[in-house]
Amino acid sequence: MAGANDREATLRRAPSMADVARHAGVSAQTVSRVSNGLANVDAMTRDRVLASMRALGYRPNGAARALKSGRFHTVGVIMFTLETLGNVRTLDAIVSEAAKADYSVTLMPVQDPTLGAVSGAYRRLSDQAVDGVIIIFEASLLDQVEISLPPGLPVVVIDSNAGAEYSVVDVDQAQGARQATEHLIGLGHSQVWHIAGPRSSFSATHREESWRKTLVEAGITPPEALYGDWTTESGYRLGLELGRRPEVTAIFAANDQMALGAMRALHELGRDIPGDVSVVGFDDMDEARAFWPPLTSVHQNFRDVGRIAMERLLAHIADPAAPVEADLIPTALVVRESSGPPPR
C-alpha cells in the first residue's frame, strides 16, 4: 500500500483511478469495476477499494461513466408553472422516484405555452445530457393540439392530449368533475354553478366539459361558467357575484383555492355554508379540512402521477421500443361539511 507520500501527492490535485489502485494495492481495472458497481469483484477487495476512495477523496467521473454506459442518470422536466398545487406535488413525486432509481432531475421552466418554446426547452435539455424528459402541461399549447418533438430522447407527458406518440399520465379530470357535480345533484340541488379555471388550462377545460356534460345528462341546462385563474382572489371575486344571486345554492370550484375565496365571499354576504349554499372544490389540498366549514373536495393522487410518469420514462430509457402507455389516475370525492341539501 502507498504511504503518506502518496497521500500528500494526491492532495495537490484531484485523485485519479490510478492513485486509488496504488493505495488499495489493486489494478486500475478493479477500481473501474468497483466505480461502475459491477459484481465481479470479491467483497474484501471491494471494501478495500472503497476505503481507499474515501481516504483519498476520490469521486468517480460521472461523465466518463456515462460515455461507457450510455446513461447520464439524469432526467429533464419541462413545465410551465410552479404556482399550482398539482404541479408542485407532481414534481416532488418525480424527484422522489428519480432519487430511488439513482437519477437526478434537471428542471426547465417554460414561460410561453407554444410548441416552439417546448421544443427549445427540449433541445436545451438534450445539450445538458439527460436520458429522458417528462413534460408537465398546465396550459394547452397555443399553436398546436398535439405536441411533436425532434427524435432522440424518450418523452413522457403529464397531460391527456399529447397524441399517440408519447406515453401519457394524467389524473382522470372528467371523473373528478363528474363526482363533484353528481354529489351536489344527489343532495337535491336543481342547479350547480361552476367557477372554472383559466381557458388556457387543459385540466380546467376537462373539468368544465365534464361538469357541463353531467348536468345535461341529469336533464339540467348548464348555466354560464365563470372563469377564474386558480387564485383565492379570483374565487372571492366570483363568489361575490354568485353569492348575490339568491337562486345559487351549489357551487363547484375547479380548485380548492378558488373554493376558499368563494367561501369567504359567501361568509361576508351572510350566506350560510352549507345551509344556503354548498361548495365543492377540486384537489383536496391538505388545508381543505381546516377550511370553515371543512371543504368537500375531489382528491387527486399527485404522488401516483409522478411515480408512474417516472416509471414509464425509465422503461423507455431502458428500451426505446417499450410500448406507449396512457395512464389515467382515478380521483375520489372526499365529503366534508361544506356540502349539504339545498335550503327548504
Image: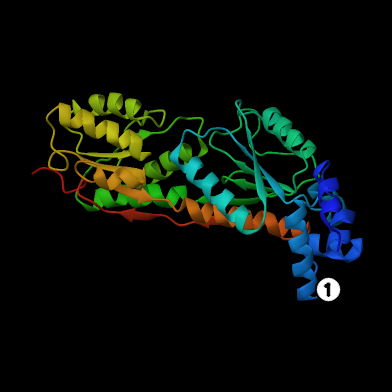
Picture layout, residue 146 above or below residue 54: above
Give the percent coordinates (x, y) of residue 223.
31, 33
Q: Quadrant of the N terminus?
A: bottom right
Residue 194 seen in the figure: no
Q: Foreground: 320 or 244?
A: 320
Q: Foreground: 243 or 3?
A: 3
**Outermost residue, front side:** 4
Q: Residue at x 28, y 35 (%)?
A: 260
Give the percent coordinates (x, y) of residue 141.
61, 32
Q: Quadrant of the C terminus?
A: top left
Residue 201 seen in the figure: yes
Whether residue 194 sits left or right of residue 174 in the image: it is left
Secondary structure beneath dot 1 equals loop
The residue carrying mark 1 is 40
Q: Of the residues shown, which amino acid type is indicated by label 1?
A: Asn
Whether residue 204 sits left or right of residue 104 in the image: it is left
Q: Residue at x 49, y 41 (%)?
A: 88
Which quarter of the figure has residue 245? top left
Picture layout, residue 200 above or below residue 218: above
Q: Foreground: 160 or 51?
A: 51
Picture layout, residue 315 above or below residue 268: below
Mark 1, Cα crowd under 10 Å, few <14 / some 14-19 / many 20+, is few
**Outermost residue, left side:** 344
Which quarter of the figure has residue 48? bottom right
Whether residue 68 sits left or right of residue 227 in the image: it is right
Colour scheme of the picture? rainbow
Whether residue 137 sits left or right of residue 275 in the image: it is right
Q: Residue at x 78, y 69 (%)?
A: 46
Give the percent coordinates (x, y) of residue 304.
51, 56
Give the percent coordinates (x, y) of residue 229.
41, 28
